Image (cartoon, grey):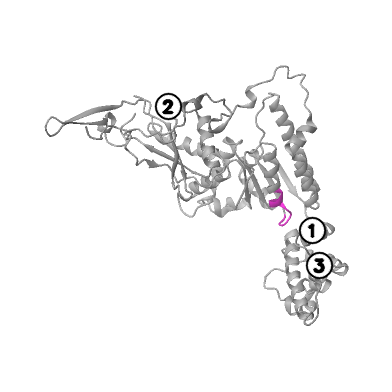
Amino acid sequence: MRLTQGCFSFLPDLTDDQIRAQAQYCIDHGWAVNIEFTDDPHPRNTYWEMWGLPMFDIKDAAAVMMELAECRKAYGNRYIRLSGFDSSHGWESVKLSFLVNRPAEEPGFRLVRQEAEGRNVRYTTQAYVTDRPEGQRYK
Amino acid sequence: MTDSAPSYEHPGITDPVSTERPRGTGPFAMPVPAGKQPSTGSQTEVVDLAKELTEAGIEDVLTELDDELVGLAPVKTRIREIAALLLVERVRRKLGLSSEPPTLHMSFTGNPGTGKTTVALRMADILHRLGFVRKGHLISVTRDDLVGQYIGHTAPKTKEILKRAMGGVLFIDEAYYLYRAENERDYGQEAIEILLQVMENQREDLVVILAGYADRMEKFFRSNPGFRSRIAHHIDFPDYADSELLAIGELILVKQNYKLSDSGREALARYITARKQQPHFSNARSIRNALDRARMRQANRIVRSASGLKITTEDLMTIDAPDLLASRVFGQDAAANSPLSDETESTFD
């Protein structure tokens, strides 16, 4: 199951040139570019690990691509996303976030039914990979 | 049913139509490598080189270079050559005559105060106008900025600087301090390795300019042969002649809305000759320091002499001979005559 998340989730995966153009777009708007990775694919998992520090004083997307290449080398089997943080007053939030890397195999989610009071059924989803401990989830 | 179904957030979704936008506009812009589209019949295509020259605005930068920098004839010639090469390279690229991007890393050698940093700044501008660096900013660093203090500190520090310099020019002043032969555990070696790697692999992303005194740079290159082979342009900055230093002095003063009186000019010429004999002479920088002190003496002279009198703009603008002759450079006699001559600096400026 192909996980989609954030901006451009309706598009096929971006190529490196497209990622570079997006990163440059963030830099040109004065947003700090962050690289984050995780192996917990649940959409409600907002706490991803940061790769290095936010890049707020760079001028060119080549720097982002360099860090991304490093991150892929170390965590190529996890989800990696790139986000642009706008620190300007009143915003102070992430303005752009999209996936730039995904594991080769994505097993997807199971639907869990919990029988509750009366005849109620509560539904939730759980990623198959989270059965295994962190760091051993994707090959 | 409770709210447990996963809800996917799409904070940045614009209308899906945007995918059909023509490529080359907006955030979806895709760079099209110029080399990929060789124009047909490129053998016969005619290019107006003069137009290219004006378009790049390169002539302006070169003229500015000629006007604002005194002397440095060999440096200017070399920069013109590099600019010509880059211009031709650019035209070739336009015609689809693809070739490897030229190596642009440079080394500036010369004595202190010969204008290495100033030229590096211009170089960044030239490279930017010709499109060989994307942003054209200059990051000026020394050993301190690249080398860390403990194990594992150097690599992130160097990478941080390299990242900031991407798309522009990285200027490493007194580059030979990076390598300390006497200490084999020095972290400088680590910084050098990272630098070399990026200089080689990301040639189109940044240009590195090393600067320093000629003899020590020579030693540095000898112990780091990797650097020498990765640097295409070695430019030597000659010392200034006396007349050039005088011209520089006048140029500095004009920029600050000062001018020299005739006797003041003569005094400055004498100062230059005398100063050159003293140790720690650093060309234009020494002149600038001398003029800064002369301004102070001039201010003091005006304040003391003009009490009760009206002073004119002319007075405020003119640096006269006594302002310069009070310098310690002219020996103890002159120093004894002026209360301001006991400069605090340890040098003889």
Chain of the residue that carries numbered disc 2 in the rendered image:
A
Q: Quadrant of the C terminus of chain A?
A: top left
Is label 1 on the same chain as label 3? Answer: yes
| Residue that extends furthest to the left in the rendered view of this protein | A118
Question: Observer-nearest residue: B250 or B245?
Answer: B250
Of mark 1 and mark 3, the one earlier in the sequence is 1
Helix, strand or loop for disc 2: loop
Tell me residue B287's x, y (percent).
76, 63
Q: Quadrant of residue B198?
A: top right
Q: Quadrant of the N terminus of chain A?
A: top left
Chain of the residue that carries numbered disc 3 in the rendered image:
B
Question: Observer-nearest residue: B298 or B271?
Answer: B298
Which residue does the numbered mark 2 point to in the structure image? Answer: A10
Apparent side of residue B213 relative to residue B329 in the rendered image (left or right): left
Disc 1 marks a residue whose amino acid type is Leu
Disc 2 marks a residue whose amino acid type is Phe
Residue span colored magenta: B111-119
Above or below, B267 relative to A91: below
Which residue does the numbered mark 1 point to in the structure image? Answer: B251
Q: Mark 3, mark 2: which one is toward the viewer?
A: 2
Q: CA distance from mark 3 to mark 2?
A: 73 Å
Apparent side of residue A131 relative to residue B123 in the rendered image (left or right): left
Q: Residues within 10 Å of mark 2 (few under 14, many from 20)?
A: few
Q: Quadrant of residue B22?
A: top right
Q: Quadrant of residue B6?
A: top left
Q: Residues within 10 Å of mark 1 (few under 14, many from 20)?
A: some
- Identify which residue is drawn at 69% across, 44% down: B125
Q: How many marks?
A: 3
| Residue that extends furthest to the right in the rendered view of this protein | B262
Which residue does the numbered mark 3 point to in the structure image? Answer: B271
Q: Mark 2, mark 1: which one is toward the viewer?
A: 2
